[in-house]
Image (tube, grey):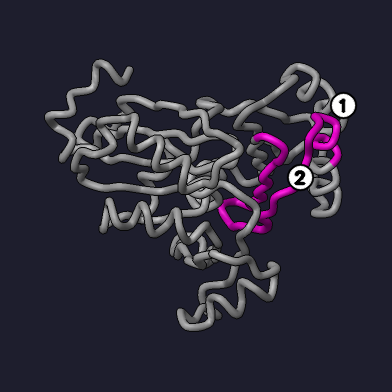
Amino acid sequence: MIENTDFNKSEQYTLSIRLATDGFSFSIFNPLSDEILSIVDYNIDGSLSLTANLKQAFASIEWLSYTYRRVNVIVVGKRYTLLPLEFFEDEDIETVFYHNHSKRENEFVSYNILLRNGVVVLFGMDKSAHDFLYERYPETRFYVQTTPLIEYYSVKSRLGNNCKLYAHRRKNAVDVFVFDCGRLRLANSYTCNEVNDCIYYLLYVWKQLGMEQERDELHLSGQLQAKEYLLSELRRFVRRVFVMNPCENLDLRAISLCE
């Protein structure tokens, strides 16, 4: 709970900020005890810009003005693309990114290098929001949500000798990651407003990759609306379906795995 957090020790803590179109989340992590001390959700005004909502959040939450050991910003969205590490060139990130995504005004393109997976994740975020946060925390590290999820799932996927599909459900979308004994095979995001859309995309990926019904595994995390229905329908086609523990806020928990 935030009221039990000792902010006199804020310089020992890590602050992580998740930016999504349906709201912000702030987590305080103590690396000395390897535990999250608190996670606070913040509702935003849909009529305001991302930066305007950030300014309101910083004006109303006093402890955001404190000094932290490390500050992470996690951007939620579908505007990312993966590139094999051996083909990565820093000066080409915008060219590669906009080859896969349409250009947007006021967008900042950045990247995360995932050494253990041998890939680079290119992503775009609102430039005004980037500049606002960078001004307040000059040492900020920016990530797309895909990055901590890949890092977390890749560690889990090394257990056993089968393929694993990880599905992270969020509002109006599902992020899908497939690993074969720790090797990343697929990372993609699909728009799905209804649970049946989510089921369709998961089974579609499962079939397209030739995953085995009896042997391979499907793991669910995130905001699992209609969870019992989702599980029962998936288990009609996939024998080994699991809900991860913890199920929610995996990105905020896994960000400590990222460099």
Residue 180 on the magenta segment: yes
Q: Position of residue 131 (x, y in %)?
A: 38, 59
Q: Position of residue 59 (x, y in %)?
A: 33, 35
Of labels 2 and 1, the one closer to you: 2
Residue bearing the label numbered 1: 236
Name the residue located 26 percent from the left edge and 58 percent from the top edge: 138
Q: Would you place residue 102 above or below residue 77 in this image?
A: below
Stretch of the chain drawn in magenta: 171-200
Q: Position of residue 245 (x, y in %)?
A: 53, 25
Residue 80 appears in view: yes
Q: Say which label, 2 or 1, has the lower sequence index.
A: 2
Q: Amino acid at mark 2?
A: Thr
Q: Quadrant of residue 175?
A: top right
| SS at mark 2 in the image | strand
Q: Quadrant of residue 165?
A: top right
Residue 144 on the magenta segment: no
At label 1, counting other C-alpha atoms closer than 10 Å, the crowd grade (few under 14, some 14-19, many 20 or more) is few
Q: Would you place residue 158 above or below residue 142 in this image?
A: above
Q: Amino acid at mark 1?
A: Arg
At label 2, counting other C-alpha atoms closer than 10 Å, the crowd grade (few under 14, some 14-19, many 20 or more) is some
Q: Position of residue 135 (x, y in %)?
A: 29, 57
Residue bearing the label numbered 2: 191
